[in-house]
Image (tube, coloured by chain):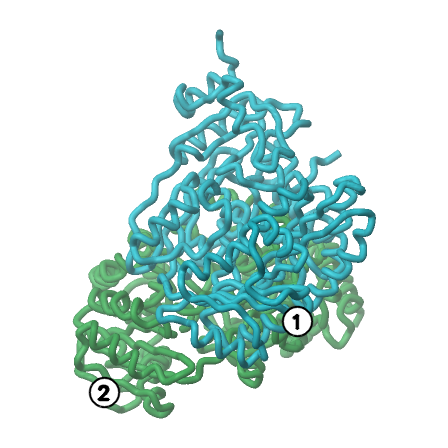
Chain colours: A cyan, B green
Amino acid sequence: VTPSPLVAALRDAAGEPHVLVDADVRAPYEIDWTRRWSGSAAAVVRPRTAGEVSAVLRACAEHGAAVIPQGGNTGLVGASVPRSQEPRPQVVLSAARMTTIGEIDRATLQMRAEAGVTLGALQAAARSAGLDAAVDFAARDSATVGGIAACDAGGIRAVRHGTARMRVAGLEAVMADGSVVCRMSGLLKDNAGYDLPALLVGSEGTLGVITSVLWQLVPRRDARALALVPVGSVSDAVALLVAVRQHLPSLDACELMTDEGLALVLEHIGTTSPVRRAAAYVLVECAARADPLEALAAALDAAGVTDAAIADDTAGRERLWQLRERHTEAIGAAGIPHKLDVGVPLDRLAAFCDAVQAALTDGARPILFGHLGDGNLHVNVLGHDAAEESIDELVLRLAAQHGGTISAEHGVGVAKARWLHLSRTREEIAVMRAIKSALDPECVLNPGALLQPRT
Amino acid sequence: VTPSPLVAALRDAAGEPHVLVDADVRAPYEIDWTRRWSGSAAAVVRPRTAGEVSAVLRACAEHGAAVIPQGGNTGLVGASVPRSQEPRPQVVLSAARMTTIGEIDRATLQMRAEAGVTLGALQAAARSAGLDAAVDFAARDSATVGGIAACDAGGIRAVRHGTARMRVAGLEAVMADGSVVCRMSGLLKDNAGYDLPALLVGSEGTLGVITSVLWQLVPRRDARALALVPVGSVSDAVALLVAVRQHLPSLDACELMTDEGLALVLEHIGTTSPVRRAAAYVLVECAARADPLEALAAALDAAGVTDAAIADDTAGRERLWQLRERHTEAIGAAGIPHKLDVGVPLDRLAAFCDAVQAALTDGARPILFGHLGDGNLHVNVLGHDAAEESIDELVLRLAAQHGGTISAEHGVGVAKARWLHLSRTREEIAVMRAIKSALDPECVLNPGALLQPRT
């Protein structure tokens, strides 16, 4: 079979073995983790270097193809797989072969990682050098550095270390026209010109394809202590966070669960609660060089907490953490949830939770949990009495009405592009569109993600 | 006298008393702090609100005027005053009346400050609430929040707290067409769309006029200890930084001086050195809740330092700090220096210093000092045997050749726009120009700053 001119050009760009065209080989690249989003690719190309990525993007531009950048394909908003409605041929640009991790610079604690390095590999490299990658979330063994930066991913430890943006000490990316942007000197202070890396972080592959990141590591703090605290309400949970935070510089995670979610998890794993049942629960974890147990206990004591379960040994911490970490699994066993990722300022978080509970009456059952320290809640809705889109829109509207965002850490993607106006003004979206048009006039990169196609 | 149509429109936008047209009233807004840059303004306008700024920008666009945004007019690169070569009428847009500081949110430690709030006022507001603004530099009583964010200013404490970018938890700005961009919810996680604040920070007033910042404060750590350490070379200074940093999480500042600079200061203030004379000196300051003296002493001991001067009382610290802080004054007393602000990666910093010393032979005398922790050096050159521009270019080229940046914390401005290509590739500058053209097609905002006018 003679390859199409597009496939021939991709083979020239990345080498024949790295252009996948057989349907069964392409298949895993064409459907996302949620199984909600899929589309057909003319080819999947797996370049090795930024230079090859540049050649791939030039080939796609020349042959009128759209490019779908893909890291670990763990995104939850449909932006990592081909669009079902795109009229042009689509090429999945996979980072799977860009997996080199560089040496650690001991003076700056920075480490170069190519886009396809998984978070787990990054964490392992940091750990083996006595350091810490400072970002963590459940998809760690599949999610890759490029996707993490492109989405400004967050996770459990952002309350201390910030989101992925804070880890990006340098970045290399290829723009739609194949030109390469590279700022990898690692200088903390470098204000020579617009901070293009800062714009690319969080742009979800719509402005450029990230090929390498200079990752800012932090010193390791291995001594950990964890408390599970029952509280009377989400409002009490927020008050507890505010009270302990100021006394705990070692605060490393602060997570929220409600009793609905805990009940599902307890039933799912067949155990009983280690603390009295209450409306909500807060997990407070500290990490320090020396055991932070005493500081944690003192902070809880000062906040009037008398009935927490506390652990500073690994087994005890894991027993408590699984009550939070197995939410997704327990919810999945109870039904097929709608999953939404929103952020709401702390002073309105309780009101938002109440509003969600009040609004979902027709058999829909919300399970709320997430990263209390960041006001970042994962709203999972079980039950099938409402059409999916109407539930999504309802929850996102409530988040916006409470001063929050429709996307905290998952990104906008294809799933939420139509609702971007809930969090951003018409004028702000016009600025975003102007930037997109200037840098990718033919909309080659990730069409339909983040910004809706113009109609 | 009938006002010009431009002045009449500005009066409509901001109110007649706030449009300054008399030459003597305009004068201080028309010349910069260095006295090196000046130009004539058709008017100086001092709006009070973002809405008024928007009206001013629309008026300027309509009447074909360029806009020069001005905060405290403490910039060192000529970007805060009218251009001498600009053919259009120029309007200085001063933030002088936008001086409101909001309440501190105790849950997030964030505080809203309008663009015209001085760093000193911001620091005082933070201090009176038991908190810390986490940025400091010498121009604190004039430099304003808007300019600090627009230039991504750095200063002495960036080694611990990062540059101004890290303080910007939210931002409001007015774009060239008068549209307002506002992201002030203060959410740590909010990846709904491109991070326009991140692009505006460091854009030097060329993409938008910053009108408010939500400033991220940090807890106060009042116990301080300071050491002045003589070292044999810049190379030894870097080694000392790397050695102490890993043992001192409380490290708050790490400054470098050379013996040439110290000699000038000692002579200028008429005192003797508190430590033995050496080729270079490092100031190491720690800040913590409890007195960090012991930790500092132990870290120095572990690094093999035996002859440091150490102080943990206010008077003693001030005596040591003045040796660094009075450099500018002492150098100014010795002549009219060329001042350059560069950043070089730590592993090449010593080689860069040697190269500067070797290159400046014809009566030019370089004094190097600055923020060792960030690789950020202020190169001051005394002596008049070389033409100013050739010295500037020589030093900037050496910084670039050593993998560094031509601007660490002062910005590019008008002064260094012609040399931006030394730090950024042609392709990167093309991306910057595309963004500028998309957001400010008539180049109304700060023309000639950061990007050279197209010829």
Q: Which residue is situated farthest in the right direction here?
A: A362
Quarter of the image containing the N terminus of chain B? Answer: bottom right
Q: Residue at x 55, y 30 (%)?
A: A67
Q: Residues within 10 Å of mark 2 (few under 14, many from 20)?
A: some
What amino acid is found at the position of numbered circle 2 in the picture? Pro
Is residue B455 visible from the viewing direction of this image? Answer: no
Image x and y of residue B91, in percent: 65, 64
Residue B53 left/right relative to A360:
left
Image x and y of residue A69, in percent: 52, 35
Marks 1 and 2 belong to one chain: no
Read off the residue under disc 2: B274
Read off the residue under disc 1: A236
Mark 1 to mark 2: distance in Å?
55 Å
Q: Residue at x 32, y 56 (%)?
A: B399
Is residue A258 visible from the viewing direction of this image? Answer: yes
Q: Chain of mark 1?
A: A
Q: Chain of mark 2?
A: B
| Helix, strand or loop for disc 1 | helix
